[in-house]
Amino acid sequence: MKRIITVTAGLTIGALALAGCSSGGGNSSDGVAEDGSLTLTLSAWSVATTPEFQLLADAFHEKNPNVTVEVKDYDPAEYNTLLTTDLAAGKGPDIITQKEVKFLTTFQEGGQLLDVSDVALPDGIGGADSYTVDGTAYATPYRQDSWVLFYNKDLFEQAGVDAPDGSWTWDDYDAAAEELTANLDGAKGAYEHSWQSTLQGFANAQNGADILAGDYGYMKPFYERVLKLQDDGAQESFNTVTANQLTYQGEFGKQKTAMLPMGSWFVATLIAQQASGDADDFEWGIAPAPQLDASTTGTDATPVTFGDPTGFGINANINEDKVDAAKEFLAFAASEEAATALAEIGITPALLTDPVVDAYFATEGAPQDELSKFAVQTHETLPENPASNKTAAVQNILNDMHSAILSESTSVDDAIAEAESRVASEVG
């Protein structure tokens, strides 16, 4: 279902949330029939190319024939703003997909999310803590992407460089990037996309850092090593990536780079692009993300990485006759049954039991080696975004710092000092 919603220029998500809180709006009795059957509405984005939403809706309906889940499609670039507009107007969906954890508190503080602490979640599910504020759960995870290292096995073999084996630190990664670049004809050893996540996410997680604390000196070594890779030509420069609007899918899929640190969502994309011909036909694998030091390397250890979950919350103004069904949907989406179905289409679910991982790698085109399976299943994944109303503002400042350093317009020390000063004065 396509929806076109016009938003007045200048409205912020925070302002819209306050409007939603004061409107008293919500879903009416629409969607509940006299025979007890009902329709739940679910917010989503890019439904035509993001099959997980309809898959979960259809699977839940099959188990609960009296409940229909209607998927509402929003523009992914304006998702949070458009969704908050609907909530403010009292026509928001019953189930609110949490696209970005950093906006959870916007909805929660606006009084727009129901307490879902009583929804039972399976043991071992990841990402649940990201939706907890002051001990109360306002959403439940169904998906948990983690950042790993994709690598082109063919290019490694061509360059005569030993492929990742799960024991790599960042020093090993840098050395491989340099050697690959020297031995390959035109391809770079590594590609780092322009997002701040590609560097700061690892620096935060592997240093056990709290971005809200306002001290970012621990990021300096990460920036220094990436600047060296850029200057040596072992990866494309930040300025080239941004000016030429390079995509990580194109750089890796067209074999312009041998290594790509990226979120596990890329598995499904790469499989699809190789099948369609949008990516070259080559053998690839997945390794754990390189580590800060050797203490978390090797297949007998647990590598540290980062990633935020995707989850479902419930509109606080939902018709009370729908609440139980909505909570049942949240529980189903977190279940092993749903996780297996998601894994079968290349989505990384929040629950990674052995049957789920088997389904994930049974997808045609997925790598079959044991290291790839280890990398997807075994990791300590720390959240990129704390559940705080300060997170969005801090991340904006850190993004400015990221661009200033990698564009080489500001020195590492000066950019970090400026970010720390801004967080202290603008966020507190």
Image (cartoon, rainbow, N blue to C red):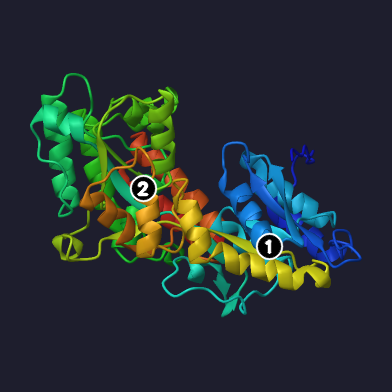
Q: Amino acid at mark 2?
A: Ala
Closer to the N terminus: mark 2 or mark 1? Answer: 1
Would you say 338 lies left or right of 376 here? right
- CA neighbours of label 2 inside 10 A, class few (<14), some (14 to 19), many (20+): some
Would you say 322 lies left or right of 213 here? right
Instruction: Residue 412: give x, y in percent of width and height.
Output: 31, 45
Report whether residue 217 is seen. no
Q: Amino acid at mark 1?
A: Phe
Instruction: Residue 346: give x, y in percent of width and height.
Output: 44, 46
Query: Marks 2 and 1, how far apart in space?
Result: 38 Å
Quarter-wise, where is residue 241 in the image?
Answer: top left
Q: Is residue 243 above or below residue 6?
A: above
Q: Is residue 63 above or below residue 184?
A: below
Residue at screen point 41% across, 72% down: 124
Quarter-wise, where is residue 5 in the image?
Answer: top right
Instruction: Residue 18: give x, y in percent of width and height.
Output: 77, 61
- On the image, numbered disc 2 is attached to which residue? 362
Residue 107's mark?
A: 1
Give the secondary structure at mark 2: loop
Q: Work out which residue is located at the far left of the displayed protein and give it.
A: 160
Q: Looking at the image, is mark 2 or mark 1 nearer the viewer?
A: 2
